[in-house]
Each structure stands twice: as C-alpha cells, then as structure tokens.
Amino acid sequence: MSYDHVLLPSGFASSIEQVEAYLSTQQGIPEAGTVSDIAAELNKRNEALPEEDSFLSTIPVGGASTGTALYVPCPYDSVGFVRRLLFELATPLDYAVYDPQLAWLIDPSGHIAAKVTHGGAGEFPYLTKALAEQWVPELLPPNPYLIVEREAQFYIQTYRDSSGMYTLEYRDGSPDKHFGTTITDPATVSALIWDWANDNRTHFTDPTWSRVML
C-alpha cells in the first residue's frame, strides 16, 4: 500500500468536498507546466538515490492528464521525507498539499512561516488560521500536542489531556517569559495560538496566566 499526497493550486478549495470536486474537474486535462516542473524535480531527486531508498511508489510521477493536480504516492516509511519535500517544492509555487488519508488540506494562503510540530503527524513549515482551527480540536492520544516555534525560545504549545482540558503555554525568549494556563474550549486555544503566531496579544489578557517554572 502507498501513502498518497496530492498537490493542487492554493485557493481553489477550502474543504475536503471542494478539493475532491476540484480534482475531478482536472481529470483528462493536459498536465500544467507547474505540475510538470514539480514532477520532474521529484523524479530527478528520486533517481539520484539507490533503488532501495526510493521515496516514490510510482516511478516516475507526473506525465498524466491531471491538469493542475499532481498525485504523489510514496511508501509509508517515506511519508515524512516526502511531505517535507513537497512543501519545499510546492509552497514557493503557491501550491497546497492535500492529504486524503488524514483529510487535511494544507494550503499556504495566509500562512505564517514557523516550525510546527503536530504530535500525531510530524513537522510542518507553516501555520494558517484554518489549520490551527482544525488541528487543535482533533488532537488525540497518544501524542495530543501541537507546538508552534518561530525561533529558538519563542514558541507556543498546547497539550490535550484525557479529560479534554488543554494546557497552553507560551515562551517569549527566556525562562522569565514562560507562562501557562488551562482552557477547556478548543476554539479559544486555536485562536490564541494563531494570535501568538501573528504577534497579536490582544486577547492574552482573557485567560489567567501563571509563570511556568522549569
């Protein structure tokens, strides 16, 4: 079995239903130039590796009548590597990454560049408001946490415990600027994470924060 990713242009869909509808409209359309370029680079990098280290399940990718969409199947043990590579190639070209297994559309529109670590799915190179709103309520065991880091010692993180309570902490550069609180509402948690990523502290006076002593 393969793990599938699909690339499509940013802004053409905002829900999984819209993604699937858009992809269906691209079937039978000649491959777009941007898709050809991305596919060529993926194939080039894959060919540079020994056969046993191939990160593609279908070789080569691309070359099909899929319009502005590119389907990239990979072995399960290559998911993290391929995802990072797709972001590297697709984001500068204003392309989104669709993960049909997780039902996630990771669209760079309006993104904030950051190191984002999702406990259940690994690392991502940016955060958007839509992703924060989707990911926070869906945090599940065994690793129900999300970390957004802009630079060393500047991060915000949340952990959802078995009761559904969220522990939210942020650190602004040093131990004396490390604060935490607990919140029950996932929408509030996602909004605060997004505000922090945007350097907006307007609503940070609403919860009661305490110094975190490590």
Image (spheres, rainbow, N blue to C red):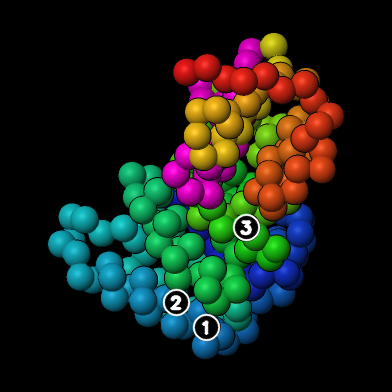
Density class for disc 3 (Cα within 10 Å; few <14, some 14-19, many ≥20) is: some
Report the side of 10 relative to 144 (left or right): right
Mark 1, secondary structure of its residue: helix
Pointer 2: what residue?
Answer: 38
Mark 3, secondary structure of its residue: strand
Density class for disc 1 (Cα within 10 Å; few <14, some 14-19, many ≥20) is: some
- Please determine whether, in this image, residue 127 is positioned above or below residue 202: below
Question: Is 9 in front, or is 169?
Answer: 169
* Cα distance in 3D space between marks 1 and 3: 23 Å
Q: Nearer the viewer, mark 1 or mark 3?
A: 3
Specify the amino acid type for callout 3.
Ile
Density class for disc 2 (Cα within 10 Å; few <14, some 14-19, many ≥20) is: some
Q: Nearer the viewer, mark 3 or mark 2?
A: 3
Residue 199 has which mark?
none
Q: Earlier in the sequence, mark 1 or mark 3?
A: 1
Where is residue 184, by image quadrant?
A: top right
- Tell me which residue sits at (51%, 79%) in the image: 35
* Residue at the far front in the pictured view: 176
The answer to whether the residue labelled 2 contacts the one labelled 1, judged by CB atoms less than 8 Å apart, is yes
- The percent position of residue 100, horizontal first and vertical second, equals 59, 51
- The percent position of residue 137, horizontal first and vertical second, equals 72, 32
Pointer 1: what residue?
Answer: 34
Q: Which residues are magenta?
A: 142-162
- Please determine whether, in this image, residue 49 is positioned above or below residue 163: below
Residue 112 has which mark?
3
Specify the amino acid type for callout 1.
Thr
